[in-house]
Image (cartoon, grey):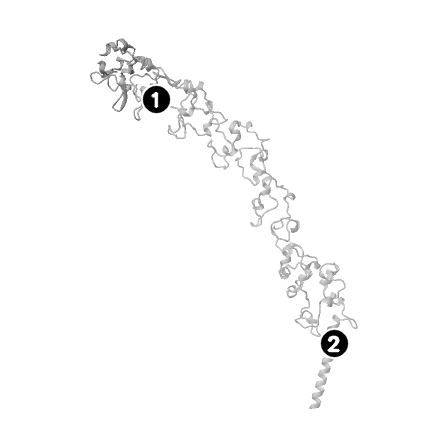
């Protein structure tokens, strides 16, 4: 028994030693079908080291790429296959080993740029992205592991978003930094050149039509033969000429002044009309009515100013023979300045004369007097007289005597220029009375205007009694006219011989009045004493003096 066990042990050691010299270890799973002593020469040459010829004989896909000088294997130079691909390390050993982070993708002829540099290998290297026919023939298990068979064409990995509208490569317009925007695209390469405002329009504003699938944006074979291909005819077919005859791409509202002339229309623009924007008359919205009540650009209702402008005078002139046409007074140079002269005013019911000629129109033609509060009053009903504009400051004192209204006394030259003759009154003005201002006698009382009718005519009604009633007659009234005249206060009619009880004789005749008539205080007022005075000598000449 011991002998047989020893023989078995030695035999097992021998077998292991011999087999280890024949096979250094298990092959990888990909080469497992080559396992066994009988298959060694499929990879190894007798008496020689490993040869790439055996590898190439099986891996025709590698040989074809080397022959075409394409891919990684065409760039490795004199390296042997086994320098990179190790075998006999077991079924689970990865025969293809490399550092994904440090791998130079440019060595395969495709440099990863932009966003490609951030993509994981497995996002591109999928069996669905394999386009090479020889690699497509691989079984799925092998296609899921291989890095071969991809195309460098964008569409091999990306869906053609334009569905074949363009024949040029994607990189003609797009970059690896991102699909949008197509920064390399220039519209100058297209049949429709962008100028003016078109340069600022976003692509989707024009490219919004789709292909037959209803989803893909159309970029080719677009209609652009005329402006109406994209723009609605704002003039609704009223003009037969091309849009470009009047407009430019700089903006629809900018009209070619050198070509379009409003003078060629039935309404030449003059004065202020030439300076206003077109849309003031030609509504911007096709359905919106313009000032003339019409829609669109073509205006036919322009024969009268009121077709576009509201009657600022609220129809006050409609009864005139011309129907109140604006151009009778106004021009296109501005509404504010009226072409209505004094000569024109002379043909109205109120010709302007005297001071009226210098009065601004607005002084008489006031606002807020007619139903339309925004306009001034230009038309009056009934007769026109001074009180139409002026208040009767006399409060009806002369109502019964004004045979010709205010002009009975006043003229239009000036209010203070009066035709009134005081001599025709019961109190003719004489002497100093003729030189004083009317207001000295005709004074205001409280808030009332000056009093003219019923004015008192007695001296003491206007003048204070300077003598403190020394000469008051019966009834307490002083008759000033007995001594004084209207010439002046100092001119006296008084005769000392006839009008006093003390006739002046002898030396008394030459005495000054104040030598006898002294100042005294009466009722707290300093006056000259005239009467009563003593008539005896002793009253003036005391004894011994």
Q: How many marks?
A: 2
Residue 78 appears in view = yes
- Rendering coords of residue 161 (x, y %): 60, 52
Vertical comparison of 69 with 281: above or below: below
Q: Residue at x 71, y 88 (%)?
A: 6
Q: Nearer the viewer, residue 492 or 461?
A: 492
- Rendering coords of residue 444 (x, y %): 31, 23
Residue 353 appears in view = no
Q: Name which of mark 2 and mark 1 comes first in the sequence.
A: 2
Residue assigned mark 2: 22
Q: Nearer the viewer, residue 472 or 21?
A: 472
CA neighbours of label 1 inside 10 A, class few (<14), some (14 to 19), many (20+): few
Vertical comparison of 266 with 114: above or below: above
Q: Residue furthest right?
A: 47
Residue assigned mark 1: 387
Q: Residue at x 64, y 45 (%)?
A: 186
Q: Is residue 356 left or right of residue 110?
A: left
Q: What secondary structure is marked by label 2?
A: helix
CA–CA distance between discs 2 and 1? 144 Å
CA neighbours of label 2 inside 10 A, class few (<14), some (14 to 19), many (20+): few
Q: Residue at x 73, y 73 (%)?
A: 39
Q: What secondary structure is marked by label 1?
A: helix
The quadrant holding residue 491 is top left
Q: Residue furthest left?
A: 474
Q: Is residue 252 left or right of residue 488?
A: right
- Rendering coords of residue 532 (x, y %): 22, 17
Quadrant (top left, top right, bottom left, bottom right) of the C terminus: top left
């Amino acid at each position: 028994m011991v002998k047989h066990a020893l023989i078995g042990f030695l035999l097992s050691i021998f077998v292991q030693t011999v087999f280890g010299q024949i096979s250094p270890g298990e092959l990888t799973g990909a080469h497992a079908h080559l396992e066994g002593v009988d298959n060694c020469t499929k990879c190894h040459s007798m008496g020689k080291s490993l040869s790439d010829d055996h590898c190439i004989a099986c891996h025709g896909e590698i040989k074809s790429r080397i022959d075409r000088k394409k891919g990684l294997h065409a760039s490795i130079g004199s390296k042997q296959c086994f320098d990179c691909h190790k075998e006999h390390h077991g079924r689970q050993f990865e025969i293809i080993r490399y550092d994904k982070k440090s791998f130079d993708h440019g060595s395969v002829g495709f440099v990863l740029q932009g966003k490609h540099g951030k993509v994981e290998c497995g996002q591109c290297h999928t069996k669905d992205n394999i386009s090479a026919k020889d690699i497509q023939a691989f079984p799925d298990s092998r296609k899921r592991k291989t890095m071969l068979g991809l195309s460098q064409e964008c569409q091999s990995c990306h869906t053609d978003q334009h569905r074949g509208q363009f024949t040029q490569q994607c990189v003609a317009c797009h970059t690896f930094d991102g699909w949008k925007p197509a920064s390399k695209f220039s519209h100058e390469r297209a049949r429709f050149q962008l100028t003016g405002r078109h340069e600022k329009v976003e692509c989707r504003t024009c490219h919004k039509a789709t292909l037959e699938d209803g989803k893909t944006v159309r970029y080719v074979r677009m209609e652009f033969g005329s402006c109406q291909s994209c723009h609605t005819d704002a003039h609704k077919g009223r003009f037969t000429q091309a849009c470009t005859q009047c407009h430019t791409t700089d903006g629809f509202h900018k009209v070619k002044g050198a070509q379009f002339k409003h003078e060629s229309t039935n309404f030449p623009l003059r004065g202020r009309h030439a300076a206003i924007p077109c849309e003031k008359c030609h509504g911007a919205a096709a359905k919106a009515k313009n000032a003339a009540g019409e829609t669109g650009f073509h205006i036919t209702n322009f024969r009268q100013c009121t077709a576009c402008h509201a009657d600022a005078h609220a129809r006050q002139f409609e009864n005139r023979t011309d129907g109140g046409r604006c151009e009778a007074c106004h021009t296109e140079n501005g509404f504010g300045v009226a072409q209505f002269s004094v000569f024109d005013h002379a043909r109205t019911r109120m010709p302007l004369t005297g001071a009226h000629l210098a009065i601004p129109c607005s002084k008489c033609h006031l606002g807020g007097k007619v139903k339309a509060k925004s306009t001034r009053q230009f038309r009056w009903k009934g007769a026109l007289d001074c009180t139409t504009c002026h208040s009767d400051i006399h409060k009806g004192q002369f109502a019964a005597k004004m045979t010709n209204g205010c002009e009975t006394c006043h003229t239009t030259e000036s209010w203070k220029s009066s035709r009134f003759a005081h001599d025709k009154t019961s109190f003719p003005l004489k002497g100093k009375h003729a030189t004083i201002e009317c207001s000295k006698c005709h004074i205001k009382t409280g808030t009332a205007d000056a009093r003219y009718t019923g004015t008192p005519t007695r001296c003491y009604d206007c003048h204070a009694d300077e003598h403190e009633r020394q000469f008051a007659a019966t009834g307490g009234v002083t008759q000033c006219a007995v001594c004084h005249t209207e010439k002046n206060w100092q001119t006296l009619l008084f005769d000392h011989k006839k009008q006093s009880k003390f006739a002046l004789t002898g030396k008394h005749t030459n005495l000054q009045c104040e030598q006898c008539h002294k100042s005294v205080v009466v009722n707290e007022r300093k006056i000259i004493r005239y009467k009563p005075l003593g008539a005896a000598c002793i009253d003036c000449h005391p004894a011994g003096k």
